[in-house]
Image: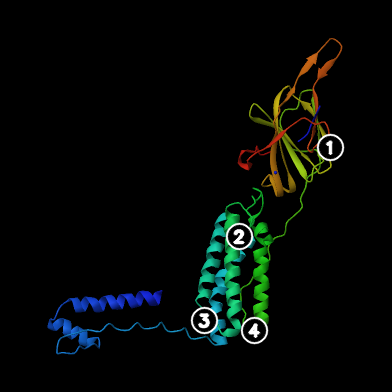
Amino acid sequence: MIIGPVRRRLLGAAATVSAGVLLAACGGSGAASSQGTASGGTSGGGGPGTTAASPTASPTPTEMTTSQYVAAVATIDRPVSAALSAVATGGSKARLNAAATALQTAAGRLDAVAAPAEAAQDTQDLSQKLKTLAGDLQSLAQGQDSDGNPVCAAASPAVQAGKAGSLAALSTQLKAMAAAGHPAGITVPSFPKQQKRSLSTGTYLRDTDRSGNGRLTIENGGDGDAVITLTRSGSRSFAVYIRKNGSYTVRGVRDGTYTVYFTTGSDWDSGRKGFTSGCAYQKFDDTLKFTTKYTSTQIEYTTYTLSLYAVVGGTARTSDVPPGQFPAP
C-alpha cells in the first residue's frame, strides 16, 4: 500500500487672536485698556481698544556645519551598534524587540538633525533604513520574516536577522556615507550564517518499544530532509530521520493504530529538535493499523510503504499541522 502526500503656526495664530478678543470683551475697564496698551494696540476717539498681536513665524533651524553634523550623528552610534551586537551574539525575542526600539529611537534623532545640504539626503536615507530594519526585527520577534512568512520554530533569531535584506541595505548606506565624508559610525557586526546540518538516514530521534512484527518503509523523494513521527493513543512511539532522496524500513512495529506525522526542511538543529529553514509540518489523514496473526505454520504481519511525495496511484491525503501542535521527536 502506497500512501502519498504548504500647524503649529496656524494654531499659534488662532490662540493669539482668541486672547485679543477676550481682552476686548472685558469691557472698558482700566485693566482691559492697560492690557491692550501693553500688547501694543490703541484706538481712536479716546476710548480703550486692543489690537491682536501678529503671529510670529517659527525660526528655521540653522544648518549644521559638517563637524557639528558628524558630532550629532555620533550620538546614535553606541546604542544602535550595541543593540545589533546583542542580536548577533544571541538573538531572542526580547533582544529583537530591544534592538527595534533602539533603531527607531535613533531614526527619530536623525529626523531632528539639521543636516548640511550635502548630507541631507544621506541622513534621510539612513533614518529610513533604520526604520525598515526595526520593522523587520519586530516581525522576527513575532515569528515572521519581512515578507510575512512564518519562521521555523527552531530557527535562530540571529541567523534570521543576518539574512534580512534591510540589514544589508543599512550596511550599504553606512559605507556610502563614510565614503562621502560624513560617516554615521554605526558598526554592523557579523551575524551567524545559515547552516546545513543533517543526520544519517535511519537515525532514531525517539525509539521506545519496537518488539512487534510490523514493518514500515518510508521513501523521501521530497525537496528536503524529513523526520517521521508515529503516535499511538496520543503517545509518541518512535521518530526516524530520512534524508532527501533516502529510504528506510522501520522494523518491529507493534500492533496498534498509529497516526503518522512528518516534518520536512533543511538544517536540523538537534538541540531545538527541528529544521531551521524551509520547514513544513504535516500528517497523513488516514491512520495505519498494524496487526499480527499467528497460524500453525506462519506469522502474518502488516507492512506499509509511505511516500513523502506525490505518486501515481497514491490515495493518501495529508493535512498541515500548526507547529505548536506538532509532536516533537
Q: Is residue 10 visible?
A: yes
Side of 143 where 48 appears, left or right: left
CB within 8 Å, label 1 to label 4: no
Tell me which colouring the rendered structure shows.
rainbow
According to the image, label 3 marks what residue?
114
**Crowd class of label 2 (few under 14; some 14 to 19; many from 20; radius 10 Å):** many
**Crowd class of label 1 (few under 14; some 14 to 19; many from 20; radius 10 Å):** some
According to the image, label 2 marks what residue?
136
**In-front residue for pair 121/168:** 121
**Residue at coordinates 75% horizontally, 27% vertically from top-left?**
210
Q: CA distance from mark 2 to mark 3?
A: 28 Å
According to the image, label 4 marks what residue?
181
Horizontal and vertical percent position of residue 192: 70, 60
Q: Amino acid at mark 2?
A: Asp
Q: Mark 4 falls on what kind of element?
A: loop
According to the image, label 1 marks what residue?
247
Q: Which badge, 2 or 3, comes first in the chain's sequence?
A: 3
CB within 8 Å, label 2 to label 3: no
Which quarter of the figure is the N terminus placed in? top right
**Residue at coordinates 12% horizontally, 81% vertically from top-left?**
29
Q: Which badge, 1 or 4, comes first in the chain's sequence?
A: 4
**In-front residue for pair 144/49:** 49
Q: Mark 2 falls on what kind of element?
A: helix
